[in-house]
Amino acid sequence: MLARLREAALLMVGQPSYEAYLAHMSAQHPDRAPMSRIEFFRDREQARYGGKSGGRCC
Amino acid sequence: MKHLPWIILAIVGAIALSVVAVSRGEPINALWIVIAAVSTFLVAYRYYALYIATRVMRLDPGRPTPAVYRADGLDYVATDRRVLFGHHFAAIAGAGPLVGPVLAAQMGYLPGTLWIIAGVVLAGAVQDFMVLFISMRRDGRSLGELVRMEMGAVAGTIALIGAFMIMVIILAVLALIVVRALAESPWGTFTVAATIPLAMAMGAYTRWIRPGRIGEVSLIGFVGLILAIVYGQYVAVSPFWGPVFTFTPVQLCWILVGYGAVASVLPVWLLLAPRDYLSTFLKIGAIAALAIGIVIMAPPLRMPALTQFVDGGGPVWSGALFPFLFITIACGAVSGFHSLIASGTTPKLIASEADAPVIGYGGMLMEAFVAIMALVGASILDPGLYFAMNSPAAITGGDPATAAAAVTAMGFPVTPEFLEQTAREVGESTIVSRTGGAPTLAVAMAEIFAHVIGGPAWKAFWYHFAILFEALFILTAVDAGTRAGRFMLQDLIGLAIPGFRSTTSWLPGVVATALCVGAWGFFLYQGVTDPLGGVNTLWPVFGISNQMLAAVALMLATAVLFRMKQDRFAWVTMVPTTWLLVCTVTAGGLKLFSPDPAVGFLAHARRFSEAAARGEVLAPARSMADMERIIFNDRIDAALCGLFLAVVLSLLAFTIRTCLAARRADRPTAREIVPDMVPAE
């Protein structure tokens, strides 16, 4: 329950689960090195706020 | 048997709704409205959303969604539906559902309540759900691309132009609300200004000290915010710092334009991202607290069910109930802007088609609930106070004595002492003509929160807390919207000059940012200098544009249903489309051609240009230059209305053409993207 709330709060500000990303990378791309937690954070920060993902609502 | 609880719920809702609808004279309790809304929403979700999902869309829980077949761990991630609901709700809910219903309360609480409840069930939630469905079946593409795929390239470009213009108007109207809330209020201005260094400190913390620790840094920021509010009252009374943070509306306008230009080119980690943490969490927290507060306090509604302004002539905004009520409450009942969100990040995160109803339809019901709470907030205030706060200075005269006289003459008795006392309680020098909706809601929230925590002595704290909460997410929207507008503009100009799309060279970005800030800054300045408060002019234009975008989204949905050969169910989208077209085209037409200068831009321009030709200066203009500016502004607004009308009518023509072509085809022609067409990442 608490973990869900934490996940929801993070996704609200554009940060998907890093664990899910790691799981995806190890399942699909075991040959590639995944981004570190901090690189992942920066990447998602830019994706959300860079402006490409559209504006916020009224 | 499984229907029995729902039948009981429906009966409860019907009873509550009839109490709300038929009570006259005697004040009713706000909880009746809440019960009526919640039970209607639940029944609508259980039956109507399910009907749309199974019969109209024929959702297939076994069909892979983009989050599954394109999974990349970044943009496309299959997400738990409760987590995604939170994400989607946080993305769609903003200032719109809070401000529109407050303004609509000038006609009494009944028209707004009925429109929010009926509008969301039949139009707003249907729109969000349909767009989410369409985008989910097409790789999570955006609204412009969806229109292009289903209705052709020209229609797609027209939709993009419309979306950009709406963005500009939204930014202007949001910034105007901040200006109205902070003008001549050193306490409010100080707390909002304090969020800038605070956010930068948070940004530095997540950059260098503890990267990525959002929870920690948000807690630190929250403590900082509370300190800023508490400390703000000492700033306001300080003989030195008080005047430093006291600004006129025009000064604030220039500060905001400058802020928008600078903030939108700063790196995102420095200001935008950390402040978004604060504004997002504060928004969710404040909305939850407001719901709990209303239930605990169970306040009676003091606004009448209907006021004499249903026929027009109201001081808050001009025009009669039809069509202008349906324009004033846009977000909360039906909001076109949501179609950009429902075709943005959400369809890329949805794990199964079976989750679409709760996200698409349910998320919008939740926003309508926020709108209902805002309407309740405005309606529990003394009507005299409501009209003294929301009538422009041209009517109230700007001080408590003249305002009390003017509002009492409207039929809502109020004394100057009461207005002064209320201002003192919330820690402001005056509350007369604080238009824009946000201050009214803040007074209501202070009333509700102080009832639960702290008592009357805490009203000033809660008032500034509410102002800060609204200003914070509006500033975030201005900043994020300017960035998004810049890319939209680069894409649009790129259609004519391909080099303009480049993201590697800095010049197109700077030019597009400047154009974007200049565009909303122009409308903001016009609104700030408007003697009728600006809300009067800008809010209807915003409402018309937002509802027109909703009509465009619903027309796209109609076209898609025809192309799926599901035309016998197309009434689900055609009924709300028709209603929105009737409202927006009538309202747009009246704004253009009404002979009443209070409503029609061209009539207003004519009145002023005729006076100017005679060499007269009409109030509120003070010089010939003022006259010229008023005439020019009217013509710009008229041109804008005309442009919106042209966008929506041309897209209507494209829709009809698409639907007719789809009917002639002997098999479905909708261009869904099936999973095996795209390689998994």
Image: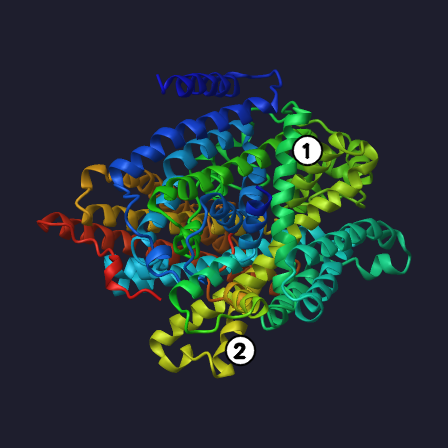
Amino acid type at image mark 1: Val
Foreground: disc 1 or disc 2 = 2
Discs 1, 2: same chain: yes
Which color scheme is applied? Answer: rainbow
Q: Residue at x 32, y 42 (%)?
A: B577
Q: Nearer the viewer, residue B138 or B650?
A: B138
Where residue B71 appears, as percent x and y from the top left, is: 38, 60
Can you identify the residue that label 2 sits on? B510
SS at mark 1? helix
Chain letter of the residue beneath label 2 in the structure image: B
Question: Closer to the N terminus: mark 1 or mark 2?
Answer: 1
**As drawn, B27 above or below A4:** above
Position in image of residue B225 (x %, y %): 75, 53
Q: Is residue B457 left or right of residue B503?
A: right
Subunit bearing disc 1: B
Residue B550 pos. (x, y %): 38, 48
Residue pointed to by mark 1: B407
**In the rendered view, does B518 fall on the left or right side of B153?**
right
As drawn, A48 above or below B370:
below
At mark 2, the secondary structure is helix
Query: Mark 2 belongs to which amino acid?
Result: Val
Judge the density around disc 2: few (<14), some (14-19), many (≥20) Cα neighbours within 10 Å: some
Q: Position of residue B631 (x, y in %)?
A: 52, 60
Q: Nearer the viewer, residue B112 or B225?
A: B225
Q: Residue at x 55, y 27 (%)?
A: B34
Q: How many marks?
A: 2
Residue B84 numbered mark, or none: none
Gap in Å between the C-alphas at discs 1 and 2?
48 Å
